[in-house]
């Protein structure tokens, strides 16, 4: 994800003055993550978020960090008092911020994996007239990095003395917590074990975890019935994906589950599958975006493989509301809804044939009926009560749905 928006009055401060004392032989700013140093990765994140004015505050092994900063094109400022603690490095970084900078994001170099969309969201909010001077990103109720500050707080931070560091220096100021679907705001690396975990996370920054998917559903205020449907589709998709893997496929189960949870994240908007894809792409979740954008209809060629996309697509056809239904039964309900509309009926018929072909491919691969696989995984919330179909029909007749079949 790279934002099309730039923030010329925003700056980023990377704090890299520490000793890396618990990292063994490793030195945090120069540790490799996804093919580049942690410092370079952070600089790239800020740039992709629209911030080009970036400074790294150095200390321990400052010559090496400065050399890396020069290589990647960011400024450096040396903190001669780095051994007194991180807050002295915070002050060094803030002292290097130019007068033209009105919005500042700060992060230690050992929290390097938050996503560009997280930074862009915070900086954009900080530029709004009613924004408080301090913003914190939050995931699952826990604050993470980077906090973003209005420049008006800098004099107070620079004047602060005593314990508590930056947290205590910011305590007098109004703040806002911004929920983000980004667990990486909490992912730090203090030890070699942490570093090993972050190396794995770095390779999957473009894929939401199921927990991040749930967080995004909450941020988008998906109603309870929508959550129930999303979780039902995720359960079915995971069961089918695991069965396919047991039969020799190599599908990404977390990607399947997260994409299934998010397949209707934009429900209610015109062409919701495309809208959902755009939303996920804006967050940097490109793999899930492609799956969500295609979940309405897929015409799978005979020689094309079954991928995560097809698994999520067919799982959605098995779940009506929160209830399990046969794929053919799901389409019968659609036929009933659009009785008398010849064009819609033709579109539904075409989509039904597409779905049945994908289903046949999956069942041939796993060697059993999909319903058997789903039941074995413990998902049996069906069939739907008659009133569920009646409610769907009432919604359709009360207004023309933007989700009517397209042809």
Image (tube, rainbow, N blue to C red):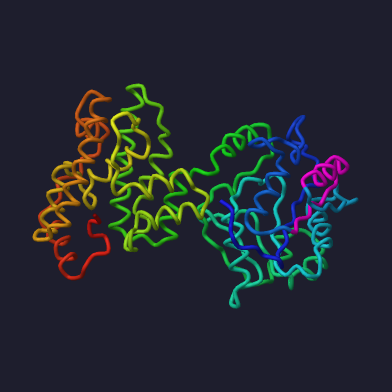
Which residue shows up at 81% across the image and 52% down it? 57
Region rendered in magenta: 53-72
Question: Which residue is nearer to you in this view: 345 or 275?
Answer: 345
Percent coordinates x, y for residue 367 in the rendering: 23, 23
> Would residue 59 be counted in the magenta stretch?
yes
- Residue 188: name its quadrant: top right
Question: Which residue is nearer to you in this view: 13 or 283?
Answer: 283
Which residue shows up at 16% across the image and 41% down it? 326
Which residue shows up at 12% across the image and 57% down it? 342
Q: Quadrant of the C terminus?
A: bottom left
Q: Is residue 114 left or right of residue 359?
A: right
- Residue 27: name its quadrant: top right
Percent coordinates x, y for residue 35 in the rendering: 66, 35
Which residue shows up at 30% across the image and 37% down it? 300
- Residue 371: name its quadrant: top left
Question: Which residue is nearer to you in this view: 265 or 298?
Answer: 298
Above or below, 190 against 186 in this view is above
Question: Which residue is nearer to you in this view: 403 or 209?
Answer: 403
Q: Is residue 104 left or right of residue 93?
A: left
Q: Is residue 23 left or right of residue 309?
A: right
Q: Is residue 111 left or right of residue 393?
A: right
> Would residue 254 be counted in the magenta stretch?
no
């Amino acid at each position: 994800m790279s934002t099309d928006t730039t923030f010329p009055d925003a700056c980023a401060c990377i704090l890299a003055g520490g000793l890396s004392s618990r990292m063994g032989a490793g030195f945090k700013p120069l540790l490799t993550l996804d093919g580049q140093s942690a410092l370079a990765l952070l600089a790239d994140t800020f740039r992709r978020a629209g911030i080009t004015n970036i400074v790294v505050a150095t200390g321990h092994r400052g010559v090496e960090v400065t050399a890396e900063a020069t290589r990647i094109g960011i400024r450096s400022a040396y903190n001669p008092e780095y051994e007194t603690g991180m807050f002295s490095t915070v002050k060094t970084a803030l002292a290097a911020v130019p007068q033209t900078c009105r919005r500042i994001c700060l992060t230690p170099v050992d929290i390097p994996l938050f996503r560009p969309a997280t930074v862009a969201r915070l900086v954009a909010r900080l530029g709004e007239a009613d924004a408080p001077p301090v913003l914190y990103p939050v995931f699952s109720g826990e604050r993470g990095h980077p906090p973003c500050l209005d420049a008006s707080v800098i004099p107070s931070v620079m004047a602060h003395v005593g314990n508590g560091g930056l947290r205590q220096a910011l305590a007098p100021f109004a703040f806002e917590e911004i929920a983000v679907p980004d667990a990486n705001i909490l992912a730090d690396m203090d030890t070699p074990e942490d570093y090993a975990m972050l190396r794995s996370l770095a390779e999957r920054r473009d894929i939401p975890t199921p927990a991040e998917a749930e967080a995004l559903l909450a941020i988008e205020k998906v109603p309870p019935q929508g959550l129930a449907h999303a979780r039902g589709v995720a359960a079915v998709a995971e069961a089918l994906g695991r069965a396919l893997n047991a039969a020799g496929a190599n599908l990404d189960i977390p990607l399947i589950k997260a994409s299934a949870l998010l397949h209707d994240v934009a429900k209610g908007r015109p062409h919701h599958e495309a809208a959902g894809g755009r939303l996920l792409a804006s967050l940097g979740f490109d793999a899930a975006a492609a799956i969500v954008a295609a979940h309405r209809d897929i015409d799978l060629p005979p020689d094309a493989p079954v991928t995560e996309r097809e698994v999520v697509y067919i799982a959605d056809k098995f779940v009506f509301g929160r209830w399990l239904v046969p794929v053919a039964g799901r389409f019968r309900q659609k036929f009933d809804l659009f009785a008398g509309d010849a064009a819609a009926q033709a579109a539904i018929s075409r989509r039904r044939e597409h779905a049945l072909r994908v289903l046949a491919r999956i069942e041939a691969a796993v060697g059993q009926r999909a319903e058997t696989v789903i039941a074995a995984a413990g998902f049996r919330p069906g069939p739907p009560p008659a009133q569920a179909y009646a409610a769907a029909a009432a919604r359709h007749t009360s207004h023309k749905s933007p989700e009517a079949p397209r042809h």
